[in-house]
Amino acid sequence: MTTDESDLTTALRAGLADFELTDEDQALVDGDAPLLGDAAAEGPLPVVAIVGRPNVGKSSLVNRILRRREAVVEDVPGVTRDRVAYEAEWSGRRFTIVDTGGWSVDATGIHLRVAEQAEVAVDLADVVVFVVDAKVGSTDDDEAVVKLLRRAGKPVVLAANKVDDERTEADALALWNLGLGEPHAVSALHGRGSGDLLDAILDVLPEVSAVAAPVESGGPRRVALIGRPNVGKSSLLNKLIGTDRVVVDDVAGTTRDPVDELIELGGRVWRFVDTAGIRRRVHQTRGADFYASLRTQTALEKAEVAVVLIDAQESISEQDIRVVQQVIDAGRALVIAYNKWDTLDEERRYYLEREIERELVQVPWAPRVNISAKTGRHTDKLVPALERSLESWDYRIPTGRLNAFFGEVVAAHPHPVRGGKQPRILFATQAGTRPPRFVIFASGFLEAGYRRFLERRLREEFGFEGTPIEVSVRVREKRRAR
């Protein structure tokens, strides 16, 4: 930090004395706050999976717990969801809640399908909430899931849903015969009993997740290979390893369990995870895609950087865009690899470039590699792209340099005047890395368009190639004269 930058930081800190700051604000300004993004300090949030038959009210219960409408609620089983995991809070405890809706079942092989999909959900959870429709009572499907839950040995909380009033409480009591302990009578629709259910969940919920725990810091950097089914993730992993370590098949979703592999590339060792999703069986329905997404989410939590594979032969799909967004939402570094590039003719390459400009406009900062997983073409270019993304993911801007930069930007492009007032940026600091997070203290509300402008200028000035960045604004008012 230069002398001028140091003087500027001191002056801006002194100016904040005129504004109402919380203790947390003051710690951020003074540089004493714990860094955001240091997951090793607190550990990953424990995971609660909501399981049960279709239409027993799982998504309604998720929305009730979140106290907002997030999960899609529809009478049709197998509804596709863009997101599968949400952060929730109760009595000061934070946890991740997973809505395992989307089971689509039919009369053929129903027990097998329900058990298989429930098994995946249970495997990825610390605590399972088993939802049963109290009005219908336990069914053969419920009994099949109960057997699975007993074998898994995970803590189970039984929710007897659709108990809307005292008259139907007897229906809940009948569920003692499932052998899972006390049935907690709830009405996801009206909220009745939801607080008692959440208390019961907290009683068995660990402080830190055992299933989502990341690999300890240090050691090889962790890379998640992700993408929609059948884009070549397993083929790429096999090519990098040099052996057929992973089952490869033209049937989408051949991989069921993520496979960790230590691979030496570019003179260093990396830990790769293949996350192709779960195995599809004949006639398997959209639920498979849901659990593939869930496994991707779990792999992202354990990774530092994600390589999103996109099949260059096919048009960029909504699912491709959703996978990229999943990486951004998880706050992981990102590299996009266009597979099967060697098979493209000039016409397809032209149209692919147009698709990238149109569909992936939100990630122009992501390094791009054109590869062939089958032949190994240009896979050597993955390493410099991974290194650039991880370097940006870890990058920290000194406070003095950051404030000097924002001073120059605001002087050249001040925030528009709204209602006769013009908000000022009072102070800025980088509150964390992995990904880089910035907190701006302002005298008034900064419009979304101006925030995007500041983020764009941050990238132009400091790079941040291959990493999402987060810019939050804290509006603080002047102290009132006493």
Image: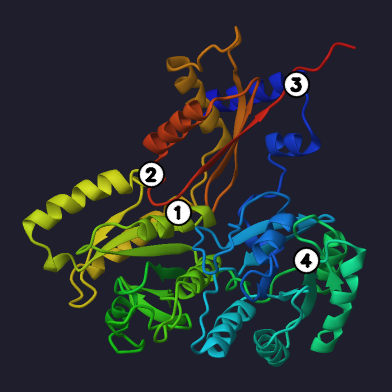
Residue at position x 44%, y 56% in the image: 333
Is the C terminus in the top left, top right, bottom left or bottom right quadrant?
Answer: top right
Instruction: Label 2, secondary structure: give it.
Output: loop
> Splitting the image into 4 quarters, where does residue 209 fall?
bottom right
Q: Is residue 469 visible?
A: yes
Q: Which mark is residue 442?
A: none
Residue linked to disc 1: 325
Instruction: Label 1, secondary structure: give it.
Output: helix
Q: Is residue 357 left or right of residue 128?
A: left
Residue linked to disc 3: 19
Q: Is residue 443 above or below residue 49?
A: above
Inspect the image, locate mark 4, and give the three-letter code of the amino acid beneath it. Answer: Lys
Inspect the image, locate mark 1, and give the three-letter code of the amino acid beneath it. Answer: Gln
- 10 Å neighbourhood of mark 2: few (<14), some, or many (≥20)? few
Q: CA distance from mark 1 to mark 4?
A: 35 Å
Residue linked to disc 4: 162
Residue linked to disc 2: 362
Inspect the image, locate mark 2, and give the three-letter code of the amino acid beneath it. Answer: Gln
Q: Name the spot of residue 217 as percent of width and height, x first.
A: 58, 68
Question: Dots 2 and 1: beta carbons under 8 Å?
Answer: yes
Q: Name the spot of residue 194 as percent of width and height, x first.
A: 82, 61
> Splitting the image into 4 quarters, where does residue 131 fall?
bottom right
* First along the sequence among labels 2 and 1: 1
* First along the sequence among labels 3 and 4: 3
Q: Name the spot of residue 339 as percent of width and height, x first.
A: 24, 67
* First along the sequence among labels 3 and 2: 3
- 10 Å neighbourhood of mark 1: few (<14), some, or many (≥20)? some
* First along the sequence among labels 1 and 3: 3
